[in-house]
Amino acid sequence: MSDLTVVAGPSSPELAGMVAAHLDAALVQAELRVFSDGESKIRLAGPVGERCIIVQSTHPPTDSHLMQAMMIARKCADAGSKVCAVIPYLAYARQDKAFLEGEVVSIALVAKLLEAAGVSSVVTVDMHSQAGLAHFARIKNISSIPLLAQHAAGMGLARPIAVSPDAGGAARVEEFARLLNTDFVALKKTRDRTTGEVTVDPEIGADVSGRDAILVDDMISSGGSIVKAAGVLKKGGAARVYAMCAHALLIGDAASKIQAAGVQEIVATNSIPGKYARVDLSKALAEAAISLF
């Protein structure tokens, strides 16, 4: 038995298999049974080594996937393993501070729960903010931007311009544009903290006429920001509009709304499995995880 084991969580079995292959590690499946009341029961299908890498993204159903990750971690820790949790999409990362009076800083609680479950280190991808990272004792936050830019370079884009849907993503889109050897612009977006309503300033700040515009974001959830941004870019004369992100949550009919807004294609990493997961993170995740032991 190898001293290094990769445990495939129920949310990320394919990604876990690829991580294990990169590391030439033993792969153990975490078998899941869900009872009629919604409770999860986890059984590891084999023994684990002294070093254990759990691969479990916490996309919806968020709470179930998070609980399963903690159950796996506890089982591995109880077996004497040192545990690294690879959680490409880390739920609650957006709840990194109290925006309104009385709100819970949920990512701080998630960090404490993972530690209590036996996790000694965490690997994630494009976590929403530096404030969230500060709650973890040992964490590596991988940027998907180099991989997304590499993919974009092969898309046959016409005079591309990289676009952030909001000012908060300016550094992200600047790096993407640098790697793609093109220019960039950040749109001006506002969101009502109470209603969640998004508005995007129609003043783009750059000439996009006849150019392919690539909207770059860390995650696409409801798709509201991308829809509004795509509308502004189309009105500005953009030829084709693409949406690229690390995490394609695409809740409900978000994908169809985005396409109806004129977006040619949605491209995401495989942090969340699905039809838009076209950019592979497994090598980067494997290298980050092994470095934490």
Image: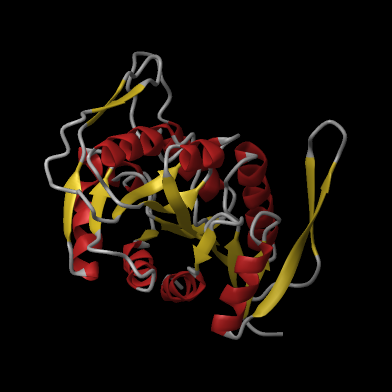
Colour scheme: secondary structure
> Between residues 164 and 280, which one lies in front from this camera angle?
164
Q: Report which quarter residue 179 is drawn in.
A: bottom left
Q: Residue at x 20, y 49 (%)?
A: 209
213 lies above or below 26: above
Residue 128 percent across, percent down from the top left:
35, 44
Residue 284 percent across, percent down from the top left:
43, 72
Q: Residue at x 68, y 48 (%)?
A: 68
Q: Residue at x 54, y 60 (%)?
A: 277
33 lies above or below 18: above
> Between residues 80 and 240, which one lies in front from this camera angle?
240
> Between residues 154 and 134, which one lies in front from this camera angle?
154
> Between residues 163 and 231, which one lies in front from this camera angle?
231
Answer yes or no: is residue 270 visible. Answer: no
Q: Quadrant of the N terminus?
A: bottom right
Q: Report which quarter residue 14 is drawn in.
A: bottom right
Residue 185 percent across, percent down from the top left:
17, 48
Q: Is residue 141 left or right of residue 89?
A: left
7 lies above or below 95: below
Q: Residue at x 19, y 44 (%)?
A: 186
